């Protein structure tokens, strides 16, 4: 399977930016989609953005125009550039990798905290 390690979270003020990184290791040759999800206290985990090995991206409506996902599948790394951050973006951000299958393994990182103060 795949192991994922996120980095880049932190505490920022509203309107500022952060860049998250996710590095994959293990059976990375089988990854075809990587993405970012987030979970705020008391809420379910939700999709933020995904990118395929073909470069196709998908965004949640609430981050369109503010966040940009990019990836280098050759280097097994995906990034999330977050601009114009809002207090409601405060959450733990998780990296996810989907592998080609069958079997269709899914792997999650341990998460990185993003806190946006008003």
Image (spheres, rainbow, N blue to C red):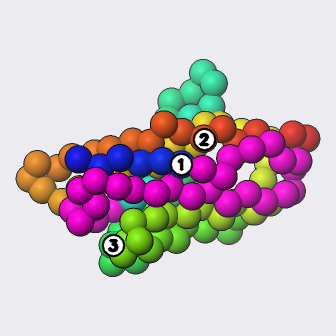
Residue 50, percent across and down? 44, 60
> Looking at the image, can residue 64 be seen?
no
Residue 115, percent across and down? 76, 39
Mark nearer the N terminus (2 vs 3) = 3
Residue occupied by mark 1: 6
Left or right, 19 with respect to 12, comes to left
Residue 6, percent across and down? 53, 48
Considering every residue shown, the one lying at the far front of the view is 26
Dot in front, 1 or 3: 1
Left or right, 118 with respect to 86, comes to right
Considering every residue shown, the one lying at the far top of the view is 42
- Quadrant (top left, top right, bottom left, bottom right) of the C terminus: top right
- Give the Cα distance between marks 1 and 2: 6 Å
Q: Secondary structure at mark 1?
A: strand
Mark nearer the N terminus (1 vs 3) = 1
In this view, the residue in front, 24 or 42, is: 24
Q: Secondary structure at mark 2?
A: strand
Residue occupied by mark 2: 112
Q: Secondary structure at mark 3?
A: loop
> Looking at the image, can residue 7 be seen?
yes
Q: Is residue 45 above or below residue 69?
A: above
- Give the Cα distance between marks 2 and 3: 23 Å
Q: Residue at x 39, y 42 (%)?
A: 108
Q: Is residue 117 magenta?
A: no
Q: Dot 1: few (<14), some (14–19), or many (≥20) neighbours within 10 Å?
A: many
Q: Which residues are magenta?
A: 7-33
Determine contact: label 1, label 2, CB under 8 Å: yes
In this view, the residue in front, 106 or 77, is: 77
């Amino acid at each position: 399977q795949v192991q994922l390690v996120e980095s880049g979270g932190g505490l920022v003020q509203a309107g500022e930016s952060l860049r998250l990184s996710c590095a994959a290791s293990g059976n990375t040759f089988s990854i075809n989609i990587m993405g970012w999800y987030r979970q705020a206290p008391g809420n379910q985990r939700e999709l933020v953005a995904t990118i395929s090995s073909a470069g196709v991206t998908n965004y949640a409506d609430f981050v369109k125009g503010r966040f940009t996902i990019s990836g280098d599948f050759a280097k097994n790394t995906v990034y999330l550039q977050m601009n114009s951050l809002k207090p409601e973006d405060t959450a733990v951000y998780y990296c996810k990798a989907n592998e080609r299958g069958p079997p269709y393994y899914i792997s999650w990182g341990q998460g990185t905290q993003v806190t946006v103060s008003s």
